[in-house]
């Protein structure tokens, strides 16, 4: 077995900070009471002298524009679960180790991703896209990988000999012993795991209990260390608090894209695609503003979803600044991965057309972009119906010899010696196609249709009314 440990040491800060591209001084406090202290702060705050463990009042004295937000343990837990769901695209064996670690068993994934180096790079780049900074470590046992990640050591160990040598150099704090046990070990000069392993096991068991010794044996692979694997939910739901109220579309889009990247990781892990999504923008004292993305076809392309959302946000006016963004999947459909061909194929053309339709609907409105489908009626004006774009036309009975471009209203044609004219005299090439229909709804017609060409060799679709003294009309163009 081979385990990858992801440790998120700044998770209390990142649940807020990842929603903004660049932030003013930002700090997270443990509570809002008199015992509150800074538990995390960003680089901008640290440059002003703000440190972990400092009272909020002292931190605000150092940075007058410091934004102070309370720690949200529930949001941290939810973030770990979404990271775990995202990570399932790399391996189905994903485990959460609260309060800030995620474990991946990757032995079976190395061949699929082209080796450990490439898999490591894809995980690292994906976490950066999500907005999280993680220490990553690889080891043959899950607990050893956790200990290396806690020590900030990004090792890639794959055999037991290297594992024992590497563990020996770690500080004993990575085992997270109780304060009393840690004080005792430090008093007797045990600073590293090597020092601890050199002590008599029986004496350590009597003084500190068996738990620490068992942890060491699990880390070395001498004892089994089963981990419960995470099961992704059947639908995706996530929220992102904002460090400060925001109304600008750019800031909202940046935060929303983080959620879309998480969504697409979840969709990839579950072999599905999203066809309808809803964003909710929360406000103080008002009902949330909802933006629904209804897509022509299911997708898990984060860039395309971001483009569609950008178009919608430009048309959406928020009543007041948003304090929180939530994303919920309303309709997910199976969407298997497909191999990419060297040359473009029909599937790529259909996907590009669907994405164009979705962007047009997001920019112009759903009611402004429609599709067409055939309808069983011989009259050309009534032989079609509007429909939702992207719906495949399964109707039959397409009449051959008719153009796709019809005029909204037939245009009367002049005549030259009883011959119809349009940029010159027309030559009849085919016809007539006689149509007598519509008596049942009061829109009856009696016409003879012809295919004609003019001196410029344009192909036209014209007809002549069959009434006495019937006139010629232009109804469509072939080219």
Image (spheres, rainbow, N blue to C red):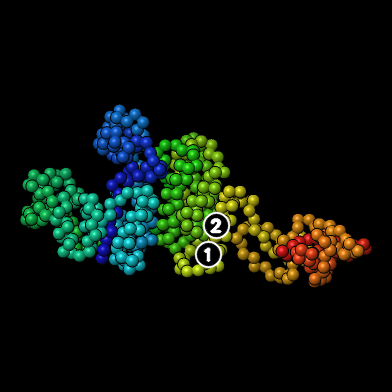
Q: Given the current orientation, which residue lies at the most extreme front position?
A: 455
| Outermost residue toward the right in this view | 468
Q: Could one spot residue 455 in this view of the protein?
A: yes
How crowded pointer 1 is (Cα within 10 Å; few <14, some 14-19, many 20+) is rated as: few
Give me the disc on residue 355: 2
Q: Could you tell me residue 126's position as x and y percent?
A: 37, 55
Image check: 88 left or right of 441? left
Q: Is residue 479 above or below residue 6?
A: below
Q: Quadrant of residue 470?
A: bottom right
Residue at image location 38% in from the left, 45% down from the top: 18
Q: Identify the mark nearer the N-term, 2 or 1.
A: 1
Horizontally, residue 288 falls left or right of residue 35, namely right
Q: Kindly identify the residue that appears in the image at 35 percent across and 49 percent down.
A: 132
Q: Residue at x 49, y 38 (%)?
A: 247
Picture coordinates of residue 463 (x, y %)? 83, 64
The residue that label 1 is drawn on is 348
Residues at circles 2 and 1 in contact by the CB criterion of under 8 Å:
no
Q: Quadrant of the N terminus?
A: bottom left
Q: Secondary structure at mark 2?
A: helix
Separation of marks 2 and 1 at Cα, in angstroms: 11 Å
Q: Is residue 211 toward the left or the right of residue 310 in the image? A: left
């Amino acid at each position: 077995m081979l385990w990858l440990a992801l440790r998120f040491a700044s998770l209390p800060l990142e649940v807020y900070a990842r929603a903004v591209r660049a932030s003013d001084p930002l700090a997270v406090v443990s509570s809002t009471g008199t015992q509150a202290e800074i538990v995390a702060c960003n680089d901008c705050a640290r440059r002003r002298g703000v440190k972990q463990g400092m009272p909020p009042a002292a931190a605000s004295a150092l940075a007058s524009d410091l934004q102070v937000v309370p720690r949200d343990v529930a949001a941290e837990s939810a973030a770990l679960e979404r990271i775990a769901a995202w990570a399932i695209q790399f391996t189905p064996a994903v485990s959460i180790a609260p309060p800030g670690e995620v474990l991946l068993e990757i032995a079976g994934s190395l061949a699929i991703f082209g080796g450990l180096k490439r898999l490591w790079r894809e995980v690292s780049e994906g976490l950066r896209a999500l907005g999280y900074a993680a220490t990553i470590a690889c080891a043959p046992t899950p607990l050893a990988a956790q200990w290396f990640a806690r020590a900030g050591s990004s090792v890639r160990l794959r055999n037991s000999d290297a594992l024992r040598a590497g563990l020996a150099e770690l500080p004993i704090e990575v085992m997270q012993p109780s304060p009393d046990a840690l004080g005792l070990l430090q008093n007797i000069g045990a600073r590293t795991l090597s020092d601890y392993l050199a002590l008599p096991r029986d004496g350590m068991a009597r003084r500190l209990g068996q738990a620490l010794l068992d942890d060491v044996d699990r880390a070395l692979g001498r004892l089994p260390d089963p981990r419960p694997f995470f099961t992704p939910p059947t639908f995706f739901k996530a929220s992102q608090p904002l460090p400060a109220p925001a109304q600008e579309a750019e800031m909202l889009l940046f935060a929303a894209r983080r959620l879309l990247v998480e969504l697409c990781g979840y969709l990839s892990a579950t072999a599905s695609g999203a066809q309808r999504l809803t964003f909710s923008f929360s406000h103080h004292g008002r009902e949330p503003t909802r933006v629904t993305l209804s897509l022509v076809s299911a997708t898990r392309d984060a860039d395309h979803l971001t483009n569609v959302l950008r178009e919608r946000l430009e048309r959406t006016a928020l009543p007041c600044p948003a304090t929180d963004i939530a994303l919920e999947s309303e309709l997910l459909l199976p969407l298997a991965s497909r191999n990419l061909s060297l040359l473009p194929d029909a599937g790529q053309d259909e996907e590009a057309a669907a994405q164009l339709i979705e962007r047009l609907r997001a920019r112009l409105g759903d009611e402004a972009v429609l599709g067409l489908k055939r309808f069983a009626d011989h009259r050309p004006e009534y032989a079609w119906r509007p429909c939702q774009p992207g719906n495949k036309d399964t109707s039959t009975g397409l009449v051959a010899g008719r153009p796709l471009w019809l005029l909204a209203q037939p245009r009367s044609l002049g005549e030259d010696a009883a011959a119809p004219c349009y940029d010159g005299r027309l030559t009849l090439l085919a016809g007539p196609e006689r149509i007598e229909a519509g008596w049942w709804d009061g829109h009856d017609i009696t016409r003879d249709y012809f295919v004609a060409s003019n001196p410029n060799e344009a192909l036209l679709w014209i007809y002549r009314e069959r009434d006495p003294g019937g006139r010629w009309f232009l109804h469509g163009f072939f080219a």
